[in-house]
Amino acid sequence: MQERRAEPRMLCADLIQVRWTDESGRQHEAVANLEDISLSGACLQLDTPIPEDTLLRLSHPKLDLVGRVRYCIYRDTGFFLGVKFEPGYAWSERRFRPKHMLDPRTLLKRGEPRRGPTGGNVQ
C-alpha cells in the first residue's frame, strides 16, 4: 500500500501525558504510548477510548502539542488513536525526540542488496 502522507512518519516509543475534556465538560488525563509521529500528527496507544474530533493536549517535558482525534480503534493491546495536530502546532525533532525513534525509510535502504563494481549483487 502506498503511503498517502505528505511527510514521513517516524516510528517511536515514549510515554506522554494526554489531557482532554469530554462532552459533559469533565476533564480527563491519561498516560499514552506514542507509537508514531510526523510533523502534522501522531498515533497514540491508550487504555481508554476517546471519541473522534475530541481536542487533546499532548504533553512531555519538551513537548506541548494540541490535536484532534481522527480515529480511535481497538486492537489486541488497547485503543489506538490517530491525532491530527491543530494549526499552529507541529512536531519538531529538535525540540522533542522520543526515547526510541526509527525512520522506516532507513530500513528500506538497509534491506536493499549491495551492488558490486560490475553492478552485480554482493553477498
Image (cartoon, rainbow, N blue to C red):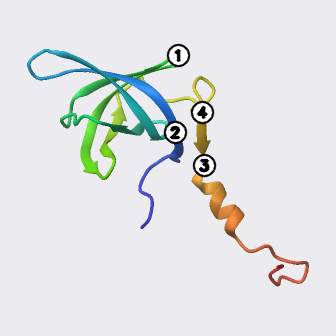
Q: Position of residue 8 (x, y in %)?
A: 53, 48
Q: Quadrant of the rendered structure where residue 114 is?
A: bottom right
Which residue appears farthest toward the right when viewing the image?
117
What residue is shown with label 4? Answer: 99
What is the distance, in whole Å, between disc 2 and disc 4 at their CAs?
6 Å
What residue is shown with label 1? Answer: 61
Q: Position of residue 21 (x, y in %)?
A: 20, 19
- Quadrant into which the C terminus falls: bottom right
Q: Amino acid at mark 4?
A: Lys
Which residue appears farthest toward the left when viewing the image?
24
Could you tell which of marks 3 and 2 lies nearer the N-terminus?
Answer: 2
Label of residue 103 in the image:
3
Under tag 3, what secondary structure?
A: loop
Residue found 71% across the figure and 63% down from its top: 110
What is the distance, in whole Å, between disc 3 and disc 4 at their CAs?
13 Å
Q: Nearer the viewer, residue 33 or 108?
A: 33
Could you tell which of marks 2 and 4 lies nearer the N-terminus?
Answer: 2
Q: Nearer the viewer, mark 3 or mark 2?
A: 2
Any part of residue 90 in sight: no
Q: Nearer the viewer, mark 3 or mark 1?
A: 1
Q: Quadrant of the rendered structure where residue 17 is?
A: top left
What residue is shown with label 2? Answer: 13
Under tag 4, what secondary structure?
A: loop
Label of residue 69 in the image:
none
